[in-house]
Image (cartoon, rainbow, N blue to C red):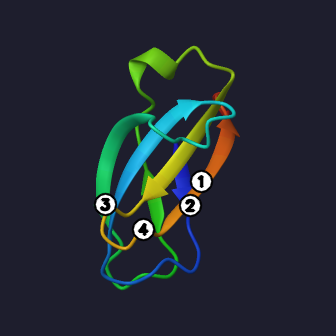
Amino acid sequence: MTIKTNNFPANDTFVVRMGAMGTRGVNGIKVDQISSGSGGELTLTFNIPASLQGSRQIAIRLESPGSGYYSFNWFYNRTIK
């Protein structure tokens, strides 16, 4: 799945997690760790964990262990043709 961020802080590290709908991704499955680089707008693609692949909706969270900055959202798990 691909996301596009906006107004991300520069030079920060974020743990990317996915979880069940309604969890805001808190304590979700770690799918990646990314660096925000120069910050701002980022386009990122992640694989959906096997245990969530059958879910209709999935929460995603990007959270920095250093700064505490976080963002979350959710998406419908479907293939776009």
Q: Residue at x 51, y 21 (%)?
A: 52
Comparing 55 with 17, the one in front is 17
Tag 1–tag 2 contact (CB < 8 Å): yes
Question: Which residue position is annotated with label 1?
Answer: 72
Q: Nearer the viewer, mark 2 or mark 4?
A: 4
- Which quadrant is the C terminus positioned in? top right
Q: Tell me, yes or no, whether the two marked residues, 3 and 2, touch with CB atoms within 8 Å.
A: no
Question: In front of the other: label 3 or label 1?
Answer: 1
The number of callouts visible is 4
In terms of sequence position, does the residue under pointer 3 or pointer 1 come before the other?
A: 3
Q: Identify whether 4 is placed above or below 81.
A: below
Considering only order in the chain, which callout, 3 or 4, is on the residue closer to the N terminus?
A: 3
Percent x, y of residue 30: 35, 38
Q: Label 2 is placed on what type of residue?
A: Ser
How many other residues sit within 10 Å of disc 2, few (<14), some (14-19) or many (≥20)?
Answer: some
**Amino acid type of the residue tagged 1 in the rendering:** Phe
Task: Give the CA distance from mark 4 to mark 1.
Answer: 13 Å
Q: Evaluate if marks 3 and 1 touch, with contact meaning CB atoms under 8 Å apart.
A: no
Identify residue type, mark 4.
Gly
Report, in whole angstroms, how far the alpha carbon at label 4 lies from the one at label 3: 14 Å
Which secondary structure, mark 1?
Answer: strand
Q: Which residue is mark 2?
A: 71
Tag shown at residue 9 = none
**Marks 1/2: CA–CA distance:** 4 Å
Residue 80: x and y in percent read 67, 34
Q: Quadrant of residue 68?
A: bottom left
> 10 Å neighbourhood of mark 4: few (<14), some, or many (≥20)?
few
Residue at which label 3 appears: 34
Residue 23 located left or right of residue 10: right
> Who's the residue at 67% across and 40% down the image?
75
Circle 4 is placed at which residue position? 68
